[in-house]
Amino acid sequence: MAKPLRKDAQRNRDLLVAAARELFAERGLDVPLEEIARCAGVSIGTLYNRFPGRGELVGAVFADRVAATRALAEEALAMPGAWDGLVHLLEGVCALQAADLGYNALASGRGPSSAVSGEILAEGRDLMRRIVTRAQESGELRPDVTLEDMVFVIWGHARTVEATAEIAPRLWRRHLALLLDGFRAPAPGPLPEPPLTPEQARRAMSPHRPP
């Protein structure tokens, strides 16, 4: 069990997380750590004492968002309608992304690799796989959709959010609705290209995930 922080150390940690949350939400994950420390009213040395790297800080800031995403997936699996569950998850995750540019980057694979543990990522993939399989077994999701297709919904949504956040902040809902119509069964026609393999998806996204 981790030793509790002293009151002053806990206060500094809370100030850093609050400052980082605000700056990341407004500008994304590339905000200089020195600026975060300055906004928190502490030294950069204090920041590194509490968070050895950017990944640890990002992980602390977005732990609640990661937990909220898991809760959305669990809610989706509990819903009577498989299609409704899939829509609930995608709309919920996209709404979280649209509200926070930092989480938008993290969800689309452009956050530090140390920000989210491999165990949590594996659990997320398993939940999404179950949601997709359930919707396909119900006959509502076209059978040729793969888990990797769902990953790129989030990736593509991230770009929509970045491009339209200050112009039309709700436009992402139109984009998602168009995608969901394309996912519905029966499909109007076969897809022109095969899906990415899990390894290809990993390679496609890895250039956007700093160490």
Image: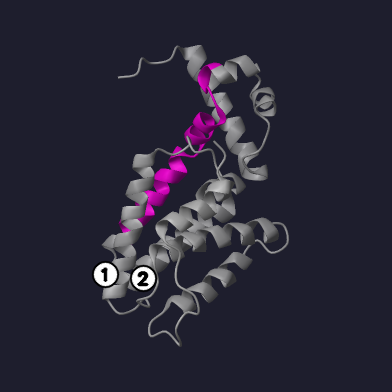
Tag 1 residue = 80
Residue visible at 34% across and 41% down in the picture: 119
- Amino acid type shown at disc 2: Asp
Q: In which quarter of the image is the N terminus?
A: top left
Residue visible at 61% across and 15% down in the picture: 45
- Amino acid type shown at disc 1: Pro
Q: What element carries label 2?
A: helix
How crowded pointer 2 is (Cα within 10 Å; few <14, some 14-19, many 20+) is rated as some
Which residue lies most toward the bottom here? 188
| Image height of 148 relative to 203, above or below | below
Q: Decide: marks 1, 2 in contact (CB < 8 A)?
A: yes
Q: Quadrant of the C terminus?
A: top right
| Image height of 119 relative to 86, above or below | above
In the rendered view, does 40 fall on the left or right side of 201? right
Tag 2 residue = 84
In the rendered view, does 168 fall on the left or right side of 78? right
In the rendered view, does 75 fall on the left or right side of 190? left
Q: What element carries label 1?
A: loop
User: Where does residue 25 sit, x and y in percent of width and height?
Assistant: 61, 43
Region rendered in magenta: 49-76
| Residue 108 in view (yes/no) | no
Most common SS among magenta residues: helix
Q: Residue 8: which disc?
A: none
Towards the viewer: 99 or 122: 122
User: Where does residue 62 sit, x and y in percent of width and height?
Assistant: 49, 39
Q: Distance between the residues labelled 1 and 2?
A: 8 Å
Residue visible at 27% across and 61% down in the picture: 78
